[in-house]
Amino acid sequence: MRYVSTRGRAPALSFDEVLLAGLASDGGLYVPETFPRLEDAEMRALRGLSYAEVAMRVMRPFLGGSIPDSDFAALVAAAYAPFGHPAKAPLKQLDSNLWLMELFHGPTLAFKDYALQLLGRLFDHLLRRRGERITVVGATSGDTGSAAIEACRDRDAVDIFILHPRGRVSEVQRRQMTTVASANVHNLAIEGTFDDCQDLVKAMFNDAAFRHELNLSAVNSINWARIAAQVVYYVWAGVALGAPDRAVAFAVPTGNFGNVYAAYVARRMGLPVTHFVVASNRNDILTRFFETGVMKMAAVEPSLSPSMDIQVSSNFERLLFDLYGRDGEALAADMRRFRETGALAASDERLAALQALFDGRRLDDAGTLAAIRETYRATGELIDPHTAVGLAAARAGRRDAAVPMIALACAHAAKFPEAVERATGVRPRLPSRLADLLELEERLVVLPNDLARIQAFVRAKAGRRAAA
Ligand SMILES: *Cc1c(COP(=O)(O)O)cnc(C)c1O
C-alpha cells in the first residue's frame, strides 16, 4: 500500500512514512493510491466481534505490512482498553430508524480519542524502532488538542506543541489541555482565530529547514492514520445495523471534514452508504458549496459549537482529489487559486456528483439550542451542541425512511455545560474520572499570531529536551 499526494508532486510513501510526515512536501495531503476493499463476506464476518477486532481488520490493509500483525493487535487493544464503555462506540436509538453513535467514551470525551489514542501508540512504536524523536505540532479549535495531548503525554520520544485560539475554546476544553502536568506538553494560546493557528502550523511545516531540524509531525486530521482509525466506527455501526445486506446513512457534525471524509472512505471500501449529511453551524462554507458549487471563504463567526468554527476544511481536498479524477496538477492549480481569490467553483458535472452523495445542512445557535431541548424532552438524552447540529441535520437530511440514519455524537454534553444548561435547565456532569478538572493548575503561554516568535518558542523548548 502506497500513499500519493493530492497535489501530485510529492513522492509516494509507505504507511509509516506517511504517519510521521503528516502533510506532503508539495503542500498536499496523502491518500492511498487505491482504496482497499472489504468484501461482503469479510464484512459479515465482523458481526459480533469486539471493537478492537473490527479495528484490526478494517485498518490492516492500510498498514501495507509496515507493522507486524501481533504488534498492531497489541497497540489497538491498548488504545481502546481505557475507554469508558465496553462497546467503545455504542449505538443508541432515538427514533424509528434514527440512531446516535456515541463517540465520547475516550479519555477526553470526544471522538478524536478514537484516532489519537491509537496514533500516539503508533508514533511511539515506530520511533522506538527507528531510534528517533519527533516534535508534534498541531492547531486545535478545541477537542483535537486535548485528545492529542492525552495521546502523547509522557512519551519519551515526543514533544507536543498545541496552538489554540485564545479565548475561543470552552473552559473545559482548555483545561483538558492546560492541566496536563507533563514536561513534554506545551500549550500555546494564540491571539487569533483557529484558521490563524492552522495557518501557523502549515507555515511551520512548509519551512523545510525548521521541519527537518525538529523532525516535525502532525496529529491534526490531515494525518492519514487518523482517517484510517476513524473509518473503523463507520464500518462498526454499519455492520451493527445490517451491512452489507442493508445500506445506512450518516450525519456528521463537520469542521475540518476529517470525520465525514473517513465515512466516505468506508463507503469506498465497500460499506453500503446511501448518502452523507454534512452538518455545519453558522460557519457554512461547506453547506453553501454543496448547494451552489461555489466554495467561498468568509470570516469565522463564533458559535455554540466551536469545534466547527472554521472556514477552510483542510480534508476537503482529499474528496476533491477524487472528484478531479485524481488529477493532482489540476487540483493544485485550483487550490492555489482558492488561496489567492478566496473562491473555488465546481463544474456542473462535479457538483452533481457531489450532490448525489453529500447533503450539506446548516443550523444556527437558536436551532442548536432548540435541538438540544427537543432531544432532551423526547428522549431524556443530554446532547452537546455539536451533536445537536448533526442530529438536526440527520432529521432534515433523510432521503429514505427505510434506511437507518446514524447521527454522530462527537462530544460529551459535559464539555459544553453552559449551552446544554441554557437549553434544558440541566447542567450535565463530567464523568467522575474528570471531576477534579476545574481545580487543577493550568500551564499555558500566550503568544501573538507571529510565526517567528512561535518557531523560536518551539525550538527553545523542544531543543532543550532533545539536548538533555
Ligand atoms: C473536531 C470536532 C468536530 C469536527 O470534526 P472534523 O473531523 O474536523 O470535521 C465536530 N465536533 C466535535 C465535537 C469535534 O471535536
Image (cartoon, rainbow, N blue to C red):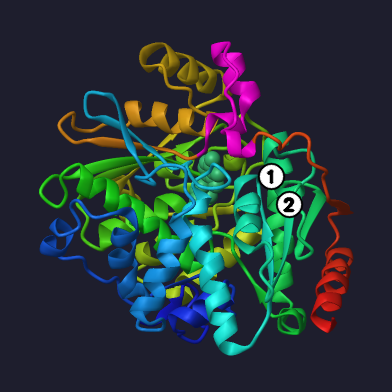
Q: Nearer the viewer, residue 457 or 327?
A: 457
Image point (84%, 55%), residue name? 449
Q: In this orientation, does residue 353 appear? A: no
Binning the other alpha carbons within 10 Å of mark 2 as few (below 14), some (14 to 19) or many (20 upward) gives many
Give the percent coordinates (x, y) of residue 363: 49, 27
Q: Determine which residue is flagged by label 2.
A: 180
Relative horizontal placement of residue 263, taking residue 248 as reference (left or right) = right
Q: Is residue 115 magenta?
A: no
Q: Determine which residue is flagged by label 1.
A: 176
- Quadrant of residue 14 in the image? bottom left
Give the percent coordinates (x, y) of residue 162: 72, 57
Give the percent coordinates (x, y) of residue 346: 42, 54
Q: Does residue 357 sit above or below 391 in this rendering?
A: below
Image point (56%, 73%), residue name? 123
**Label 1 is placed on what type of residue?**
Gln
Image point (83%, 50%), residue name? 443
Relative horizontal placement of residue 355, taking residue 444 as reference (left or right) = left
Residue numbers of the magenta segment: 411-434
Q: Nearer the viewer, residue 313 or 391?
A: 391
**In the rendered picture of this protein, how many numbered marks are placed on residues?**
2
Relative horizontal placement of residue 379, taking residue 39 as reference (left or right) = right
Give the percent coordinates (x, y) of residue 257: 48, 51
Q: In this orientation, does residue 70 appear? A: yes
Q: Does residue 81 sit above or below 207 in this rendering?
A: above
